[in-house]
Structures are given as structure tokens and as C-alpha cells.
Image (cartoon, rainbow, N blue to C red):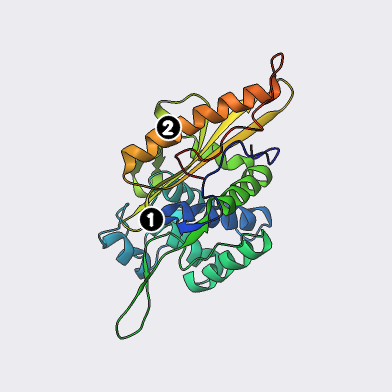
Amino acid sequence: DATTGDIYYQYHSDTAYPIASTSKLMTCLLTMEALSTGQIALEDVVTLSLGAQMLAASDDGVIPLEAGQQVTIHELLLGALLPSSNECAFSLAEYIAGSEEAFVGQMNQKALELGLSQAVFFNSHGLPAYTEEPIPSKRQNRMSAQDMFRLVSYLLKVYPQVTDMTSRKTAFLASLETEVRNTNPLLHNLTGVTGLKTGTTNKAGACLVTSLAVNDGVLEHDLVVIVLGTEDSIERGRVSALLARYALGAFQERTSPGPGSTGAEDSGTEKPGAG
């Protein structure tokens, strides 16, 4: 429960894992902060760089982009969050900090400020990053499920409007004349889902951070399910849906305890699943 900080179930939640494109939630947070301070505006027009074009043209490209094209901040956010566009996240990083390298410094600094003890970022999007050594090694953004819960709880508490974007199944990016689809499968088959982000690389496996809006009769709560390292997208959807339904049941039990109920305090130890 991101609203109260209560944790209903966790498994290996303090171990750092590669997080793939769920990294874009930190990119989103820093973008929301830049918007809130007036450094940038949703209507700002970003002129895309050659670096964004090269990323779009790579095997990991999601949305065809060309250097010199002009796209708004709002469209870049939608592109990064819904279809998980790496080139859109990269373009946000460049525009906000002047370079992706500088933006990554901000990501790691924000992780320290939030107390994310297992978090380390190498880029704005979550793809493998290669060192510049003669024999390059591959590095990936990493974080524990506990850290991700802290990050998401902060994001939802301070910038709840982010779910206005992440809850959308599709969006039309007028500057690019392109319609994009949300990669989150639970938006289509589970009531109350408001986001948040998928992620997949070979090393990270298939990851999914899910948020759900629920109400205890007085206050609306955000429940969060974090699943890292599943075998494929089908499994991440299955496990996430299973844990989401468990979370909904635990929430109802805590807010409306029946006679003799002990609530959800004693549940969720050593079961198969993910943090």
C-alpha cells in the first residue's frame, strides 16, 4: 500500500535485480520534478538529436524518430511510459539535463535522496549499457523491489497525475502522427489498474510494476505490485495479476476486518513469487 507504507507480501525484496525499462519510472519522476519547478513545461517543443535517431534506428528502437523532428515534452512522456520508447526517455534526459550522462547523475543522486540503497543507474531507459574498455562489459540499471516500492510510493504521492498517463491504453502523438499502445497487460483485464511500467531485457527477464486505485470508504489508496525477473511477458502478467488480487484481498481484510480476523499481518511469508 503506497499510501500507508504497509507491505502485504514480499519475497527476496531486498535483493538488487536488473530492472530494464521500469527504470523509466525514475526518468518520469525527474521529468515531473522539472515540470513542477517550472524548468520545463509539457508544451515545450524538443528538437530531437542524432543520438535519439540512432537509438530509434537500433534493434531496440520503439518509435521511428529522426534528428531535427520536434516533439513536445508531453508526447515524449507518453512515448516513454506507454510503449516504453527508449528514444523518448533519452530525449527527455537530454532536454532536462543537457546530456544523458548528466541526467544519469541526477537519477543516481535522486536515488540517494530517496534512500534507495540498492539502486544504480547507467542510462535513462534501462537497456544494457556497455563500458568503453577494449573488451566491453555489459551493465544494467539495478534496484531491489523494496527500492522500487519506495520510488513508486514517492512518485504516486507527490505526482499522482502521472497515472493520468499510465492508465491510458493508447495515446496519439500528434507531432509524430503516431498512435502508441500501453504495454501493461493488466490494464486490459483487471479493474482499478492505473499503471505503471513494463520492462524486459535478456538479463532482467520480464518485469512489471503495477499500480491499482482502491478506496477504503474514506481515502483512496494506491496499491503497488512489483514483479522482477520472470521468464517472459506471459508469466509476468500471470504473477502480477495473482499478486494484485492477493493485495486487493489483503487490503479489504485490513480495512474491513471480520469477527476474529487477524488482518493480513501474518500472511505472505515464503511463498513463490516476487517482491
Left or right position of 168 against 4: left
Q: Is residue 194 shown above or below 138?
A: above
Residue drawn 34% across the image and 45% down it: 177
For this orientation, the residue located farthest to the top is: 259
Q: Nearer the viewer, residue 176 or 19?
A: 19
Question: Residue 71's spot in the image, x, y percent?
Answer: 43, 54
Left or right position of 210 against 152: left
Q: Nearer the viewer, residue 225 or 260?
A: 260
Question: Residue 59's spot in the image, x, y percent?
Answer: 25, 59
Question: Residue 97's spot in the image, x, y percent?
Answer: 55, 68
Quadrant of residue 96 within the rendered picture:
bottom right
* Res 246 visible: yes
Category of crowding for the residue at label 2, using alpha-carbon neighbours closer than 10 angstroms: few (below 14), some (14–19), many (at least 20): many
Quadrant of residue 201 within the rendered picture:
bottom left
Label 2 – label 1 distance at C-alpha: 20 Å
Q: Which residue position holds label 1?
A: 204
Left or right position of 25 against 58: right
Q: Which mark is residue 225?
A: none
Q: Nearer the viewer, residue 76 or 261?
A: 261
Q: Which mark is residue 186?
A: 2
In terms of secondary structure, where does tag 2 sit? helix
Quadrant of residue 208 within the rendered picture:
top left
Question: Residue 134's spot in the image, x, y percent?
Answer: 30, 86
The three-letter amino acid code for the residue at tag 2 is Leu
Quadrant containing the N terminus is top right
